[in-house]
Image (tube, rainbow, N blue to C red):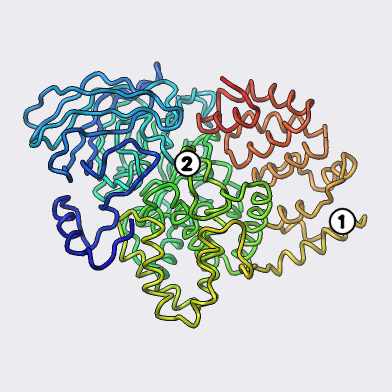
Amino acid sequence: MNLSRGRASSSILLCALLASCSHPERPDMLAVTDVHSFSNSSQVRVTTVDLDLHVLFDVKTLMGNVILSFTPIDPNADTLVLDTRHLSIEKVEISEDRSKWGDTTFTLGKEDPILGAPLTIKITPSARFARVTYSTSPNASGVQWLTPEQTAGKKLPFMYTQNEAIHARSWMPVQDTPSVRVTYNARVRYPSGMQAVMSATNDQTRTSVTFAGDTVFQLARPIPAYLIALAVGDISFKPAGIRTGVYAEPSLLDSAAKEFEDMGKMIDATEELFGPYRWDRYDVLVLPPSFPLGGMENPRLTFATPTILAGDKSLVSLVAHEMAHSWSGNLVTNATWSDFWLNEGYTVYIERRIIEQIYGKERADMEAVLGRQQLEEEMAHLAPRDQVLHIDLKGRDPDDGATSVPYEKGYLFLLQLEKTFGRERFDNYLRSYFDRYSFQSITTETALAYLKETLLDPNRDLADQIPLDAWINGPGLPVGAPRVHSVLFDKVDDAAKKWNAGSNDIPLAARWSTQEWLRFLNQMPANLGPVGMKRLDDRFHLTASGNDEILAQWLLMTVKQNYQPAYPKLASFLQTVGRRKYIKPIYEELAKTAAGRERALHIYHLARPAYHPIAQSTIDAVLKLTI
């Protein structure tokens, strides 16, 4: 909901009621309609989450309770409505001051296949706290339980959560909408010999504890529930700078710390560009390879896939991306999942500015060229409604909006603003944007109103060059969308032409980065065939590549070109890597033929138990399975 200046006084009153206002206007505290939440946050708003959980590996369950501090916005509200998914609710109590608790009535509504079920709690006018005693399902969509064999060290089991977009409700009853921000505390108990970490204060010197003891976490900055994260396993820590470090299984720790040693420089560069880092520390947890995403920007502790450990820092743009979310996404957050581009488009822009600052403009340009290529290829197969930035997701899973559109189209929109108004003026706008809406969740309408107020309206002669509605609400890319050019890719294209003309002499290949290899492979003809694939493999040993980004592209080509010598590697890759970016296109390509689908089903039968529930649902849909 957009907030005009004429409503400032009512906004101040509302902020006073919520006791969390740092600005004279708080658009995130106004009523926002979120079609992906049952919660009645416009009537009663949760402000703090206190978790007390046992991590039970033997039954794959989190069990305990959560105390929710809440503030009535509507004085006549007599219920608190929370989001849940497959939770077993044992008891609900309410309290005025946490000193005395009394039972209250509650109902768990009908389960919706996308949204889960509403938990409606009866509250009294004086109640300010609700305590819910509950346990999770072993199949909770936001929790993955790994056996020792599915980890790098193969000694201890591993558990981690993944909440985005609406999976927090699968392991805690909360108002699971990004429009509601909470502080949180957690007490976590888990088996001896392991370590727990969260998107909160983590003691880098802490050793493992037993159920007889506690590990307590706290995050005093308000965040949406999707950013509350927990992991427990054989986890060690190594510092990478004064305020940065790496958590990982012991066997991955040294290589990860080396790969991410530039994190401190990244923070410094981003602060110089866009203002202070407000989360104290920035650490990365490298997860087992089943993690379905490249990274997840949990505050203070990014969760990352081990597939980015290339050994040459060529894939650390992912770390730059997740770090950039500390400004765009975590600090200023999309209020609904239809506003997802506010998180991702701004973040891709900042990511590439970080890459340019640390690794040079040519590296950033290559990333941008590959990003646009991915966008154009994906949009060619998307319905027009899914090509817009401000996407309508009513009645749909918010994961349907997680295409390259909010990322790359959002980036190109901001890049056009930079090129039109000049970098200095645009940087000033971004810094003021992060200051103005820090620790708030905003809608597209609010973001555009501020853009018009601070950048477009004061520069009308330039603003007329921006087709704003076409960018935000139109399909495809507007005419004149910026196109980045890479000089290094020109050299790769020349090498690809020579290769395709029959030359085996490609001396530059020995020094190519991951991005250059991807460009080279993308220049191979569509009718390459098994013979052409073998020629490439004999020369460059691509089937044996240790770089997962290159290998995933090569294995996709393997399916398209029916290159059977690489099929054992294909099966092995799909059974050990769960990152959706890699596995989804390969399964989609396999599913195009009867023989390919049969191969896919055989591999997936073996691979599915190791995939995260998010990846399972994605591949189930690709293969049209009902499980």
User: Where residue 231 sits: x, y (%)?
Assistant: 39, 34
User: Where residue 339 sits: x, y (%)?
Assistant: 43, 52
Residue 102 in the image: above or below residue 445: above
Of the pair 293 and 113, the residue shown nearer to us: 113
> CA gap, disc 1 to disc 2?
43 Å
- Residue under the point 48% across and 58% down: 262
Residue reaching furthest to the right: 502
Of the pair 582 and 203, the residue shown nearer to us: 582
Determine which quarter of the picture holds residue 188. Answer: top left
The residue labelled by disc 1 is: 499
Residue reaching furthest to the top: 59
Query: The disc labelled 1 sits on which kind of residue?
Result: Trp
Across the whole image, how many numbered discs are drawn on residues?
2
Determine which quarter of the picture holds residue 508. Answer: bottom right
Residue 235 in the image: above or below residue 372: above
Position of residue 505 in the picture relative to residue 380 (left or right): right
The secondary element bearing badge 1 is classed as: helix
The residue labelled by disc 2 is: 398
Crowd tier of the residue under label 2, counting other residues whose Cα lies within 10 Å: few below 14, some 14–19, many 20 or above: many
The secondary element bearing badge 2 is classed as: helix
Position of residue 545 in the picture relative to residue 223 (left or right): right
User: Where residue 197 sits: x, y (%)?
Assistant: 35, 38
- Residue under the point 78% across and 43% down: 541
